[in-house]
Image (cartoon, rainbow, N blue to C red):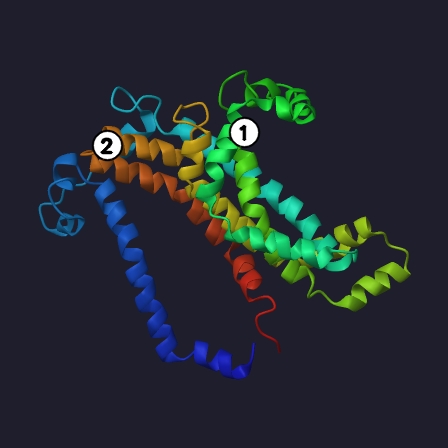
């Protein structure tokens, strides 16, 4: 980073601007938290800022109802919460692993047509997600017979194979496949740009020492690409965690496979006036994205800045 840019970013005006933007950005989340702690009669009839006018009315019963379920909300939020983890973690790891290998191959393994393949993958980003939902849904509804080797492989997984691939029912597999396909173009593009900028001398020295492509990928590319890997992993995890459209299309609304976003949509539709329950569930839902972001923000910033400036 140049000294001029560093000086501008650390100036009092820049600091004041960041503080103001941060406060404005935090107000909706703070209002969500306050509403989730108010009794239903107050949450639905007045704005959240009136909660700080005496007499004060705060309660934790909203979270208790959302977590424990009971007659109002069957099963509670935890099954959907766990489903979100089951969906989000593989849906972040699988496209990341595939994109890393593809990015390395396109950047450092020269073959005829590599540039055309990269441009084709890059162009796939312009395909709207909504256009692919109906063809994919039709494909999945026809059954898994069109890829019998994959079906056989998944069913052979002990304990979980048949649950993941039920006969005629929904499973997590369509969600993983859909999120992987939708994420791959952007992942390959971002990781390719980062990996292609790695020092060429390192690769040449490794080849002189007799290292194979697999060894170079494992010993050089993966450690050096950690900021880019962390950046994309955060993006993909947060995207999948907060996704509603793909989940509604491929997971349905059952407690067996639906993520927490579907749960929130269900209680919003079923109990539209129960604002206190919706806000409590929404605040529980954003806890994980906040933990992931703050835990990995150092890698996130390094990944975003990698290659953008020199010096």
Tags 1 and 2 in contact by the CB under 8 Å rule? Answer: no
Question: SS at mark 2?
Answer: helix
Between 177 and 230, the residue placed more toward the observer is 177
Question: SS at mark 1?
Answer: helix
Q: Is residue 15 visible?
A: yes
Q: Residue at x 74, y 53 (%)?
A: 105
Residue 90 drawn at (x, y percent): 57, 37
Within-10-Å neighbours for mark 2: few <14, some 14–19, many 20+:
some
* Residue 15 sits in quarter: bottom left
Q: Farthest residue to the left: give it.
A: 55
Which comes before the other along the chain, label 1 or label 2? 2
Relative height, residue 199 to residue 53 (above, below)? below
Report the quarter where the N terminus lies. Answer: bottom right
> Label 2: which residue?
61
Q: Residue at x 85, y 64 (%)?
A: 205
> Label 1: which residue?
139
Residue 175: mark: none
Q: Is 230 situated left or right of 118 in this image?
A: left
Q: Is 52 situated left or right of 233 in this image?
A: left
Between 175 and 226, the residue placed more toward the observer is 175
Q: Farthest residue to the top: give it.
A: 167
Q: How many marks?
A: 2
Q: Residue at x 57, y 42 (%)?
A: 181
Q: Is residue 186 visible?
A: no
């Amino acid at each position: 980073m140049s000294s001029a840019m560093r000086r501008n970013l650390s100036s009092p005006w820049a600091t004041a601007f960041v503080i103001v933007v941060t406060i404005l950005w935090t107000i909706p989340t703070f209002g969500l938290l306050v509403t989730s702690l108010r009794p239903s009669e107050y949450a639905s009839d007045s704005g959240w800022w009136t909660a700080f006018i005496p007499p004060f009315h705060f309660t934790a019963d909203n979270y208790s109802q959302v977590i424990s379920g009971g007659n109002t909300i069957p099963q509670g939020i935890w099954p959907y919460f766990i489903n979100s983890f089951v969906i989000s973690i593989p849906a972040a790891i699988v496209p990341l692993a595939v994109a890393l290998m593809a990015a390395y191959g396109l950047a450092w393994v020269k073959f005829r047509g590599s540039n055309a393949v990269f441009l084709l993958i890059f162009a796939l980003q312009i395909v709207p997600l909504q256009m692919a939902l109906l063809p994919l849904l039709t494909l999945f509804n026809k059954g898994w017979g069109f890829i019998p080797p994959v079906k056989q492989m998944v069913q052979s997984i002990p304990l979980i194979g048949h649950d993941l691939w039920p006969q005629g029912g929904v499973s997590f597999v369509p969600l993983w496949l859909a999120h992987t396909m939708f994420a791959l173009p952007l992942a390959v593009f971002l990781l390719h740009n980062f990996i292609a900028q790695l020092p060429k001398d390192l690769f040449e020295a490794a080849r002189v020492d007799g290292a194979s492509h697999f060894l170079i990928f494992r010993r050089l590319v993966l450690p050096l690409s950690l900021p880019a890997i962390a950046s994309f992993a955060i993006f993909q995890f947060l995207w999948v965690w907060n996704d509603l459209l793909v989940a509604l299309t491929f997971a349905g609304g059952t407690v067996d496979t639906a993520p927490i976003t579907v749960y929130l949509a269900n209680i919003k539709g079923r109990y539209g006036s129960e604002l206190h329950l919706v806000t409590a569930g929404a605040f529980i839902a954003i806890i994980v994205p906040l933990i992931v972001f703050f835990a990995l923000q150092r890698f996130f910033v390094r990944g975003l800045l990698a290659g953008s400036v020199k010096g």
